[in-house]
Image: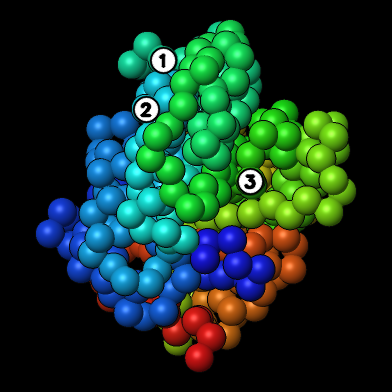
Amino acid sequence: MPTSTRARIGVLLPRDLPIDQVLPYARRADALGFDEIWLVEDLGFRGGIAQTGAVLAATERIAVGVGILPAGARNAAFSAMELATLAQLFPGRFIAGIGHGMPVWMRQVGAWPASPLTLLGEYATAVRTLMRGEPGPAAGRYVNVEGVELVELPETAPPVLLGVRGPKSLAVAGAVADGVVLAEPATPAYIAASLAQVRSGAAAAGLPADTRFEITSYDVAAVDDDAQAAIARVRPGLAWYGEPDWAPHLIGLPFAEDLAGLRRECAGPDEFARRLPDEWIAELSLAGTASQVREGIARRHEAGSTSVVLTPVGEDRLGELDRLAEVLPR
């Protein structure tokens, strides 16, 4: 079940994986023993719902998460129908991720709202309400599914996690969702701080103090007998970590100010990635020997992540998948 209390390890299906490798990659992840596989929906790449249905049908055991579907892209009632159908066809194996979407993409398609927090809260509330078999809630500022009811329902509604990063959005997640998806880099400090914000939002909404939340965290990852080789492989994947949108991920890190200063010195993300010190990369990723990566995963679980999702790098994604599997418990 996606909401098992056991600490889990998942893997990301890269958005640019050649189409003829998508289902073999998913089957391989299933066979290797990963608990979850997460798919992305980035503008111009592949649709999240279509990918999810195909991967669920092509695999037998692994839980499949989609992270994330932008709230502004779809009507809430029709999204609830899609998500409920996946949960009905593949009981206990589907996890729904919903978020704001990248502002630049959502503005590009004319779907960025004046109040992203209001839209996300209304949207998540409506989708979860409908999937429980209850009539749609009262119309809000952006979402109006009042009185709508789904006829076909899963035995158990899938968990709905919000893919968010700022403190206000994390608090909304605590009030209206089953948990969060934390984009990379998700250091232990960031996970702990995010969970505290989620719990704060839950408390403000009057939820019980012992409410359990799913915390799915992503990190760029590589495993190699030579730790320096693993660091070198993930380095290009950290190119954007100096940009403003990633600032919340760095709070609490001893080198956060130095990292921001480095980015100001660099002409662009590629130079920034080239100049990152190895010791910073080790903190901002899960790269190293299998033993080192296992330790990093354990620290993230201890900080509150219920599922640590590894993002492979490099050209040979199937080969990277096999190497990442070395960290799985046997």
- Amino acid marked by disc 3: Asp
- The residue nearer to you, when weighing 39 against 158, is 158
| Disc sitting over residue 111 in the figure | 1
User: Residue under circle 2?
Assistant: 78
User: Residue under circle 3?
Assistant: 178
Q: Percent x, y for residue 182?
A: 59, 48
Q: Percent x, y for residue 64?
A: 40, 58
Q: CA distance from mark 3 to mark 2?
A: 20 Å
Determine which quarter of the picture holds residue 291: bottom right
Counting residues from the N terminus, which is met first, the one under dot 3 or under dot 2? Answer: 2
Left or right: where 77 falls relative to 169:
left
| Disc sitting over residue 211 in the figure | none
**Residue furthest to the front:** 151
Asked if the residue at tag 2 contacts the one at tag 3, i.e. Cβ–Cβ closer than 8 Å, the answer is no
Of the two numbered discs 1 and 3 in the rendering, the one whose residue sits closer to the viewer = 3
Q: CA distance from mark 1 to mark 2?
A: 17 Å
